[in-house]
Image (tube, helix red, strand yellow):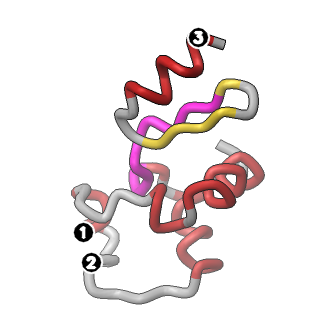
């Protein structure tokens, strides 16, 4: 996933909306108790996509994060 594609999701959901703070990768990266500037956190995400709440789905201009069946059905309906 390119930095531009990540930015598309962060513009819509915010950085905290796309990271998986409950995932094992978050703890393994030592981020559980750290507060990083957004630019540094974006760099970590670009290097380790396991930090993201997956799946990130884009269909045209529609976006969804995580298991969002309502959004997926709306994408399919278009």
Q: Earlier in the sequence, mark 1 or mark 3?
A: 1
For label 2, the residue is 32
For residue 41, above or below residue 62: below
Q: Residue at x 61, y 69 (%)?
A: 43
Q: Secondary structure at mark 3?
A: helix
Q: Is residue 44 above or below residue 25?
A: below
The extreme top residue here reads 77
* CA distance for labels 2 and 1: 5 Å
Of the residues under marks 3 and 2, which one precedes in the sequence?
2
Q: Tell me the residue at 70%/57% (across/down).
A: 7
Q: Are marks 2 and 1 in contact (CB under 8 Å)?
A: yes
The vertical placement of 55 against 28, above or below, is above
Residue at numbered disc 1: 27
Q: Is residue 11 depicted above or below 36 in this figure?
A: above
In which quadrant is the C terminus drawn? top right
Instruction: Point out residue 24 in the picture as x, y percentages from the top left corner.
Output: 22, 57
Magenta segment boundaries in residue numbering? 50-58
- Residue 34 relative to residue 8: left or right: left
Residue 77 is tagged as 3
Q: Where residue 34 sits: x, y (%)?
A: 35, 87
Secondary structure of the residue carrying tag 2 is loop
> How many numbered discs sit on the rendered protein?
3
């Amino acid at each position: 996933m390119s930095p531009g594609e990540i930015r598309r999701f962060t513009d819509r959901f915010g950085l905290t909306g796309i990271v998986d703070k409950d995932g094992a990768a978050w703890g393994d990266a030592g981020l559980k108790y750290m507060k990083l500037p957004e630019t540094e956190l974006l760099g970590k995400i670009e290097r380790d996509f396991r930090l993201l709440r997956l799946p990130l789905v884009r269909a045209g201009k529609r976006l969804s994060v995580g298991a969002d069946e309502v959004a997926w059905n709306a994408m399919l309906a278009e």
